Image (spheres, rainbow, N blue to C red):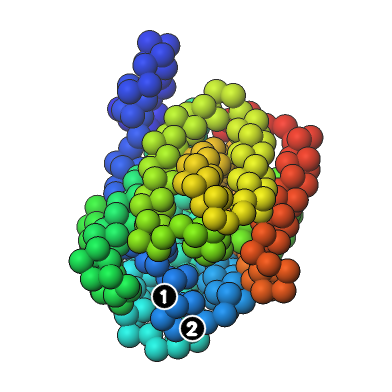
Amino acid sequence: MTRASRPGAADAAIPSARFRYLGGNVLVAGLVSFFTDIASEMIAPVLPLFLTVTLRAPVAAVGLIEGVAESTASVLRVFAGWLSDRAGRRKPLVVAGYALSNLTKPLLAVAGTWPHVLAVRFVDRVGKGVRTAPRDALIADSVVAQHRGLAFGFHRAMDTAGAAVGPLLAFAVLAMAPEHYRTVFWVAAIPGAAGILTAALFLHDVGRPAVAAPPPRLAFVGLGRPFAHFTLAATVFALGNSSDAFLILRARNLGLPAAVIPLVYFAFNMVYALLSTPAGALSDRMGRRRILVVGYAVFAVVYFGFALLRAPAGRWAVPALFLVYGVYYALAEGAQRALVVDLVPAPLRATALGTFATATGLALLPASLVAGRLWDSLGPAAPFFYGGATATTALLLLLPLRDRPLH
């Protein structure tokens, strides 16, 4: 199937036939993300425990580390997106970003203090910031507009399939070597290396002219009012969307055994992976805004749920809330990227994706810092009341937005 081809009515009626419209770049990008997320998500469910138990870091330090890490990734996306549009090439930045992130994974194994972990996470997220906007733009370049939601949904599904496998591997390592978190970090280097090689060998640029763009900045000139409206709503949402590390700490706080947490995280990622592709395809048919409104509502329910649970009985509700949390991710992540692309001119896709990621990502630092402070000062429930309230506000801001015709 060529990029210029259009689906027939019969194909549109058969979900499995839709996969023929995904180009090689979409499939390879999904595989690269699969390997990289195995590595990342082996680390994710044990890093908060490593910090608070092994390194004796306060919860506020966890918030600082995760806030700095995610904000760093987001600030760099606008620069990487601009450079990708200006050069007319995506692959060099994508490969460099994946390499930088995955080569830092083993450094966590030798960390002796929480500032060391902060430095490693900072470099890791620099890699994410370099690769994300060019990669998402390459995915958009590689499919027709009518299947853009499907393509982003498929990519999220592959990404999250790796995120589901990662905690299982972490659980296996910890089952053989209880509380040996450093061993988990060493093993995570293997799938990370596979991700680098796959990106370098099999991704390819889609021919496109370079764009004479002004220097990168956090601005909405030329990107349109609907894009600015959506970015505002998503940024408000991000102000309460603290790191998932707090969900892991809350699960432990409610009495869930540490060894079970990777399994719960696996189940969350499986829901995310299984629903991402159909949710992306649904956004092609029903509109991105409707899907995002439902996603934000699900997030608010989950966060208010974590706020209201009480130990010890509440620990048995934790797995169910994590499963519902996977529904939020499946609904929101792919549709959000696809909506950004829908709202802006085609030559500025990577710039818009980078600007959006930077605007929303800048909010992640105060989100995690506030969550850490609320936890230490008011108790473990406070960050989740705060997150549920900001999600509700963002949902109300999103309601007046209208979807744009696909282009």
Q: Reading the chain from its start, which is encountered first: label 1 or label 2?
A: 1
> In the image, what residue type sits under mark 1?
Phe
In the depicted view, which residue is nearer to us: 154 or 260?
A: 260
Residue at the image position 31 percent from the left and 42 percent from the top: 27
Q: Which mark is residue 50?
A: 1
Quadrant location of the C terminus? top right
SS at mark 2 in the image: loop
Residue at the image position 40 percent from the left and 89 percent from the top: 112
> In the image, what residue type sits under mark 2?
Arg
Q: Residue furthest front?
A: 312
Answer with the quarter of the image where residue 376 lies. bottom right
- Residue 389: give x, y in percent of width and height: 75, 51
Residue ID for mark 2: 56
In whole angstroms, how far apart are the C-alphas of marks 1 and 2?
8 Å
Q: Residue furthest bottom?
A: 112
- Residue 280: give x, y in percent of width and height: 49, 34
